[in-house]
């Protein structure tokens, strides 16, 4: 046993003996004086290393860079953590016998990972002492079977209400919003006078005659206003405690309502309370398996799915500190049906502030805690397939995912289906992982699919996401109960499912090694959507779809990455994974930070390619959107239309994957290993294809068959000493892994 695990097991044993939970900060004080010097020395070095990393502000990259021979050793039978994970719902009388039965059935189907979800009508209530003992039993039984476990961090969803304990034990830490309190209809010359309660923060009036909104001044605790000429709607805005609805296993109604309120996601005290009654309790009961059998905590859809604007006490002070002006007079204009340009800019400033608080005080706190306990934090947001909806209720996808060890998406409600449009949203998760030096990104797939996919359709849906960079698969469908054969049904119960489960495991294993190799990045227009320009999302998605159809693979980046994360080296932007972007596409946008604009100019001067589409000028954001000047922007490649034209395609760097004849249904992703290149190729179309394809890389060429686990060499032709040409025969809905290995003799 290594020293790190020995130290960890010692602390968990002492905590249980004392009947208390020691925080990570107090662990050093808990060391007894008679601890052997070697163990103490090892522990001090470990803590010192951890402290240095946690204070560095830099994400810890776990990107591996093996040779093809090293990867091949485990290709046929990869480690269990690359397996499909079943979302294992504990419904009904889940006994030790039921747990054993389910785990045995799962493993016999080549499923070696479970994501353990609390369910309804369990013998021990969620977060009770009995619950933790049941989970501990399951973890031990999984360990005996060489299986791995992720723990869902909530009793259903969204994450952040701790099965009802937050509202019961600390209601002051529950979610808060801004909402319209009172409205008055007034004609020109009419007056309103009334006292104000302490929670009224702002007032505005909307003139239905000319469509303009004006701020109404509040004087202390009174409102006195006379309406000018026009037909006015006066509205007052207040802050209140109100939660998005939750579905809680501890809710006697069994419904989705507000009885078990969510935490105030922007308040670090609230996140601390949430983790105190969830994460820390798991650590106390089974922390010795953290990083061993237990791989991480899984979050689900934390957001403000509510009519109102996110609020937390102190946000106006934070706003003043970061933006330099008082936002309170403008708050009511956030609810205007027709805000002025000034008011739109203030809203963008407010969205930047609250989304930063959400990212730092909810997601980052959990990610840092998981990192310090050898765990991954997995979480997906709500509405990834509809980023304008996501930005309304969660602020900024990329900001929220920045520190998360395994960013994710979900594919439900037929968001991905054979024959439909070409969805790109799985790339948001994989791109976030690539940018921030994270090893993996995940999909939660198949919840609420109606009709449910058949066997071939399900495999297509998963391949569609894998070829867009996802490399961890979590499958719904498996509610465990005291009756039946572990709930397995549909295509999961087919005799050939175990072979597909092993196929997915091999795919995830291959796609989790090496450095992602897309040379192109597309800027996502989050700041433009903050300003109310939702059309930018639609245009950007259409451009990304066009790039995929022409085999120009890409990552999606945000402005922060341009500002602070990407480094410029030898004419490329380098991300935290070591990936090199040779070109950046800017879709039509309304605004960009002044620093990002400056860095793009620096990148272009160093030899990089910047392609600006449909942009003549933008708001150049310094400290605020409110006072941002309009500036002309011009790069060497400027496309005046709002489309991905042939001129734009011609300006891109030479693709690492070139088809001899066009085929929009062929998609691919490319990763670099030590001395080798891996290509994963998917034929999304209904017809078989027989194509010649030129691949960047030199050396012998092999096909790695993920269904059989076998590797074989295939003929190839060298091209310019830098690439190889191979013949690709690929049936409809089928995939292929091709490895070009220059180390092969």
Image (cartoon, rainbow, N blue to C red):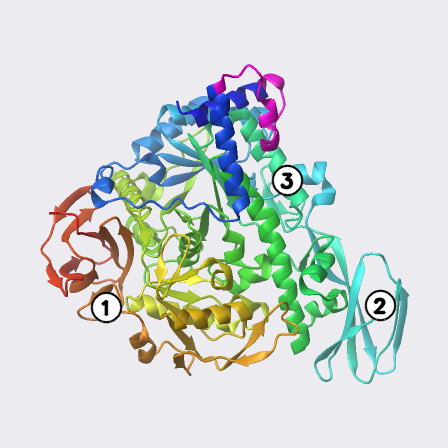
- In this rendered view, identify the residue nearer to me: 714 or 565: 565
| Residue sitting at x 16%, y 64% | 691
Q: Is residue 78 left or right of residue 148?
A: left
CB within 8 Å, label 2 to label 3: no
Q: Is residue 66 left or right of residue 593?
A: left
Q: Residue 569 placed where, x, y %?
A: 38, 62
CB within 8 Å, label 3 to label 1: no
- In this rendered view, identify the residue nearer to me: 693 or 193: 693
Give the residue at mark 3.
Answer: 272
In the rendered structure, find residue 663 and report the number of the disc placed on it: 1
Label 3 or label 1, whichever comes before in sequence order: 3
Label 1 secondary element: loop
Residue 102: image quadrant is top left
Q: Residue 359 placed where, x, y %?
A: 58, 52
Q: Is residue 127 above or below residue 310?
A: above
Residue 426: image quadrant is bottom left
Give the residue at mark 2.
Answer: 218
Q: Residue 239 placed where, x, y %?
A: 75, 57
CB within 8 Å, label 2 to label 1: no
Label 2 or label 1, whichever comes before in sequence order: 2
Q: Judge whether residue 10 is colored magenta.
A: no
- In this rendered view, identify the residue nearer to me: 599 or 652: 599
Q: Residue 462 placed where, x, y %?
A: 34, 51
Q: Judge whether residue 36 is colored magenta.
A: yes
Q: Is residue 513 left or right of residue 448?
A: left
Q: Residues within 10 Å of mark 3 (few under 14, many from 20)?
A: some
Closer mark to the observer between disc 3 and disc 1: 3
Give the residues drawn in magenta, as a range.
16-37
Residue 725: image quadrant is bottom left
- Disc 2 to disc 3, C-alpha distance: 36 Å
- Disc 2 to disc 1, C-alpha distance: 63 Å
């Amino acid at each position: 046993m290594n020293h790190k695990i020995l130290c960890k097991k010692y602390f968990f044993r002492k905590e249980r003996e004392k009947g208390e939970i020691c925080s990570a900060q107090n662990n050093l004080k808990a060391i007894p004086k008679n601890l052997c010097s070697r163990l103490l020395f090892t522990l001090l070095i470990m803590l010192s290393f951890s402290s240095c990393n946690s204070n560095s502000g830099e994400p810890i990259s776990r990107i591996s860079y093996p040779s093809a021979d090293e990867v091949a050793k485990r290709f046929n039978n990869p480690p269990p953590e690359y397996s499909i994970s079943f979302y294992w719902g504990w419904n009904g009388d889940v006994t030790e016998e039921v747990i054993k039965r389910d785990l045995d059935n799962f493993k016999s189907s080549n499923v070696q990972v479970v994501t353990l979800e609390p369910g309804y009508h369990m013998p021990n209530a969620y977060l009770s002492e009995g619950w933790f003992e049941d989970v501990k039993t399951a973890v031990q039984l999984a360990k005996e079977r060489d299986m791995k476990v992720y723990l869902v961090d909530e009793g259903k969803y969204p994450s952040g209400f701790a099965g009802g304990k937050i509202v019961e034990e600390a209601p002051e830490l529950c979610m808060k919003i801004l909402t319209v309190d009172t409205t008055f209809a007034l004609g020109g010359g009419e007056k309103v006078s009334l006292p104000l309660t302490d929670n009224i923060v702002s007032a505005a009036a909307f003139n239905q005659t000319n469509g303009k909104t004006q701020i109404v001044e509040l004087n202390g605790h009174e409102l006195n206003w006379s309406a000018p000429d026009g037909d006015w709607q006066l509205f007052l805005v207040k802050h209140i405690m109100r939660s998005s609805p939750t579905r809680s296993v501890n809710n006697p109604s069994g419904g989705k309502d507000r009885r078990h309120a969510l935490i105030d996601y922007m308040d670090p005290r609230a996140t601390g309370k949430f983790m105190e009654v969830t994460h820390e309790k798991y650590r106390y009961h089974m922390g010795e398996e953290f990083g061993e059998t237990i791989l991480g905590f899984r979050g689900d859809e934390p957001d403000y799915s509510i009519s109102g604007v996110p609020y937390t006490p102190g946000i106006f002070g934070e706003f003043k500190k970061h933006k330099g002006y008082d936002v309170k007079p403008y708050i009511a204009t956030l609810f205007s049906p027709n805000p002025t340009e000034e008011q739109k800019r203030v809203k963008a400033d407010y969205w930047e502030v609250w989304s930063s608080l959400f990212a730092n005080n909810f997601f980052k706190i959990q990610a840092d805690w998981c990192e310090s306990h050898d765990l991954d934090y997995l979480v997906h947001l709500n509405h990834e397939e509809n980023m304008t909806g996501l930005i309304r209720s969660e602020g900024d996808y990329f900001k929220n995912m920045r520190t998360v060890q395994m960013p994710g998406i979900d594919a439900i409600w037929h968001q991905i289906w054979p024959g439909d449009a070409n969805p790109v949203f799985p790339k948001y998760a994989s791109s976030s992982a690539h940018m921030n030096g994270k090893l993996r990104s995940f999909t939660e797939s198949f919840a609420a699919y109606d009709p449910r996919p058949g066997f071939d359709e399900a495999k297509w849906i998963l391949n569609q996401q894998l070829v867009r960079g996802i490399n961890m698969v979590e499958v719904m469908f498996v509610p465990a109960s005291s009756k039946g054969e572990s709930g397995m049904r549909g295509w999961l119960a087919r005799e050939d499912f175990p072979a597909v489960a092993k196929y997915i495991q091999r795919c995830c294993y291959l796609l989790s090694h090496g450095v992602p190799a897309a040379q192109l990045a597309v800027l996502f227009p989050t700041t433009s959507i903050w300003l109310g320009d939702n059309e930018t999302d639609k245009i950007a998605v259409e451009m990304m779809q066009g790039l995929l159809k022409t085999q120009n693979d890409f990552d999606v980046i945000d402005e922060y990455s341009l500002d602070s994360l990407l480094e410029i080296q030898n004419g490329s932007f380098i991300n935290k994974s070591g990936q090199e972007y040779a070109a950046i596409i800017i879709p039509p946008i309304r605004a960009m930070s002044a620093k990002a604009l400056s860095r793009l100019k620096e990148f272009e001067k160093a030899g990089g390619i910047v392609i600006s589409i449909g942009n003549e000028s933008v708001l150049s954001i310094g400290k605020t959107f409110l006072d941002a000047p309009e500036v002309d922007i011009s790069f060497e490649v400027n496309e005046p239309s709002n489309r991905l034209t042939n001129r734009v395609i011609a300006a891109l760097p030479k693709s690492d994957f070139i088809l001899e004849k066009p085929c929009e249904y062929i998609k691919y992703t490319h990763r670099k290993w030590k001395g080798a290149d891996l290509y994963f190729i998917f034929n999304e179309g209904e017809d078989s294809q027989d194509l010649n394809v030129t691949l960047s890389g030199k050396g012998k060429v092999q096909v790695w068959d993920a269904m059989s686990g076998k590797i074989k060499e295939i003929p190839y032709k060298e091209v310019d000493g830098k690439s190889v040409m191979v013949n690709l025969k690929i049936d409809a809905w089928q995939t292929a892994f091709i490895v070009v290995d220059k180390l092969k003799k």
